[in-house]
Amino acid sequence: MPSSAQLRWRTEAEFGDLVRAQFMHGPLRAADVSAPMDAGDAFSQAFFAWMRRQLPRCSRLNFRPQLLDTNAVLDTIAYQYSRADFEPKSPLHLGFELPEENVYRFRDAGAFQARHSLFVPTMLSLIERASYKTVFVRTPGWFLAEFACWHWQGEENCDDTYARELMEEYFGESGEEIERNLPSAVRPEIYPDELRSPVRIPGRRRRASTLSEHELLQLRRRCSGVQRRVCTELIALTRLLRRAGRRNVLHETYDADSLCSACAVTLTDSDRTSEILDDHFENKSQEGEATYYTGFSPFASTPGAIRRQYADWTLAFEIIAHLDRLLAMVTI
């Protein structure tokens, strides 16, 4: 797990008080510190040692935890319009750097759907929910929403007639370009309706288009091999997300508008998804406001807040571990 600290121009007294409080009231171990150059180095060694114990090496999610002091954060967001919204509540912050984005494709989605029509929709829903709680993952839902913003004024559910009128009147598209960008051509390629809005199963009481924990437990009993292991990960994520509730488990207080995601997941190997990503990166580059960080989490300084923060971070890292394990099972 690559990691680093950017600590410069800090207020030594304030920073020293924070480090002492973290060692006194948090789970950091002095035994993890070896020949530190200063308080910042001691804290960095102890914190990343603790993090390695919580979070195994990921095979799909690509991110790097970083420690940044307030001035390093201000440097990072210096060109953002919303930088004035950053109100430092601590001299030290945790950030997750997303240095590059890898794209993976679902494998054997048809086999999962053949087992149960809500198998893949449940996977996608839990991947999205887990990523919103931790590190962002692009899913077919993101690709469709992005395409809809560019061509259908954000109307993901529009029909061909509405989309054709929009593309002719507002975007000046014509001929083959319009036909290629109609919902009837795009949605089956990016995010088919049978996965996005599954037909209700006759006799099923639950109205949600995803499987409940009880249904996943029943499904797991009928599965074997990879499908059984996937059920196990989905059950684990369901339980962890229930524990997380509505809490901001990473304690991020500023959205840094990351250019990249921790990874992208598509249903097919499509040129269209590559085009959507290329347009996204080009647009963000032209805006000039994107960073390579998801956001920044100020370190707590009081005993109760420190304990709550580390408890939530531990939960967040559990979610990340199971999310990465699930992605490794279902994507190539």
Image (cartoon, rainbow, N blue to C red):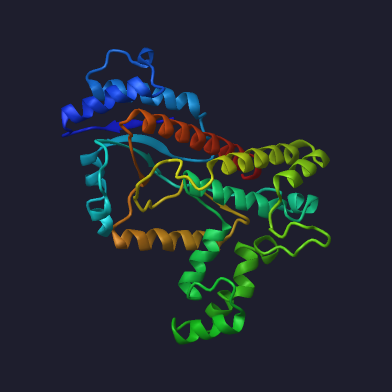
Name the residue: 19% across, 30% down: 14
Q: Which of 143 and 281 is in front in this view?
A: 143
Most distant residue in the front direction: 304
Q: Nearer the viewer, residue 166 or 22?
A: 22
Where does the image place residue 55, in percent across and percent down from the top left? 50, 30
Where does the image place residue 16, in percent across and percent down from the top left? 22, 25
- Visible residue check, residue 65: yes
Q: In this view, does 36 lie to the left or right of 122?
A: left
Q: Is residue 310 left or right of residue 213?
A: left
Where does the image place residue 258, in percent across and percent down from the top left? 38, 51
Q: In this view, does 281 lie to the left or right of 210?
A: left
Of the 4 image quadrants, the one containing the N terminus is top left
Q: 16 above or below 247? A: above
Of the 4 image quadrants, the one containing the C terminus is top right
Name the residue: 71% across, 41% down: 231
How many marks overall? Answer: 0
Where does the image place residue 150, in percent across and percent down from the top left? 46, 71
Q: 46 above or below 177? A: above
- Visible residue check, residue 104: no
Name the residue: 33% across, 21% down: 23
Q: 325 above or below 161? A: above
Name the residue: 44% across, 81% down: 171
